[in-house]
Amino acid sequence: MRFDSLFYTLPLPLIYTISVAVVLCALAVGIYLGQRRVSKASIKEDASLGSAVAATLGLVAFVLAFT
């Protein structure tokens, strides 16, 4: 069986459930790692936060420009 034909044989609700489970697991791992990092080091101010917000807003503006 080829790997690309796997998605054609699985029912759509199962693919949806697997996708949601993967996203929720990634979120849980991210939250866990973030809380662990904050508890280990007392971070008072993160200077890279402003640049991350600017990059995100730039990407949103880029997507809006195409729509």
Image: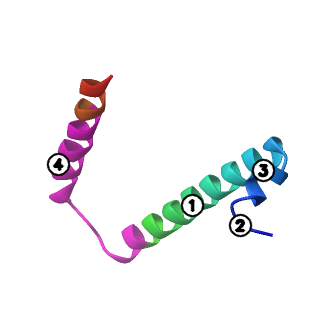
Q: In x, y percent, where is residue 17? A: 76, 48
Determine if the magenta segment contains residue 56: yes
Identify residue type, mark 1.
Ala
Of circles 1 and 3, which is in front? 3
- State left or right for residue 42 relative to residue 12: left
Q: Which residue is mark 2?
A: 3
Q: Secondary structure at mark 4?
A: helix
Q: Secondary structure at mark 3?
A: helix
Identify residue type, mark 4.
Gly
- State left or right for residue 27 relative to residue 46: right
Mark 3 or 4, nearer chain start = 3
Q: Which residue is mark 4?
A: 50
Mark 1 or 3, nearer chain start = 3
Q: Which mark is residue 8?
A: 3
Q: Which residue is mark 1?
A: 26
Marks 3 and 1: in contact by CB < 8 Å? no
Mark 1 or 4, nearer chain start = 1
Q: Nearer the viewer, residue 59 or 9?
A: 9
Please report the bounds of the magenta region as a residue range: 37-60
Distance between the Cα atoms at labels 1 and 4? Answer: 24 Å
Residue 62 to residue 10: above or below: above
